[in-house]
Image (tube, rainbow, N blue to C red):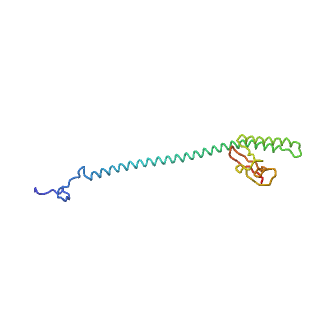
Amino acid sequence: MENEIDKSNVTNNPEGGAAQPPAAGAPGAETQAALEALQKELQAAQAKAAEYLDGWQRSRAELANYKRRIEKEQSEVYQNAASRIIARYLEVLDDFDRAMRERPAPDNGDMAKWADGTALIYRKLQNVLDAEGVTRIEAEGKEFDPTVHEAVTQEPCDTHPAGHVIAVVRQGYKLGDKVIRPALVRVAQ
């Protein structure tokens, strides 16, 4: 039986010969190697993307924490400044309380002393404002300036030129160059 062919080693080959395992340089091997290389590249890119996402999330959290910290610090600075200023006004309020408790009866001759004490408290308050940099806006007799004056009325006037302040109804104040409260004024027509 020499002519008998071992069919276990033969695959369906159209040329009738035995099938050969793919050679190392054949197209199937190249495809497999390329696929493995692409999978490695994909894994590396996914790892890098995960690293970037983690870094981005950390940066975002750090920014949110920074914003919260800055807002808290600004709030504390404001509260400290306000409490310092208010504490200075409380001293003046205490002086007014003492003055009101010591107010003499209208028929008593001590009214002049009480008035002098009240004037002293007024000067003390003015000194507190001066120390904070608050200045009064000069208005009377000056030309009307809408950036620092607020007109209440316009009146005919023989003593002041048109567009000039006749009288101040309520004083205005500045802190440095910033207007805290404009002066309420009567203006000549």
- Considering depth in this image, is 128 or 47 the residue closer to the camera? 128
Q: Position of residue 144 (x, y in %)?
A: 74, 50
Q: Quadrant of the C terminus?
A: bottom right
Q: Position of residue 148 (x, y in %)?
A: 71, 49
Q: Position of residue 183 (x, y in %)?
A: 74, 49
Instruction: Identify the residue shown where x is 87% and y is 46%.
Output: 106
Instruction: Identify the residue shown where x is 31% and y is 51%.
Output: 34
Q: Is residue 86 above or below residue 158?
A: above
- Considering depth in this image, is 179 or 189 the residue closer to the camera? 189
Q: Is residue 132 above or below residue 164?
A: above
Residue 130 falls in image quadrant:
top right
Q: How many labels sit on residues?
A: 0
- Considering depth in this image, is 7 or 35 the residue closer to the camera? 35
Q: Quadrant of the N terminus?
A: bottom left
Going by the picture, which residue comes out furthest to the left? 1
Left-right relation of 57 to 134: left
Left-right relation of 124 to 4: right
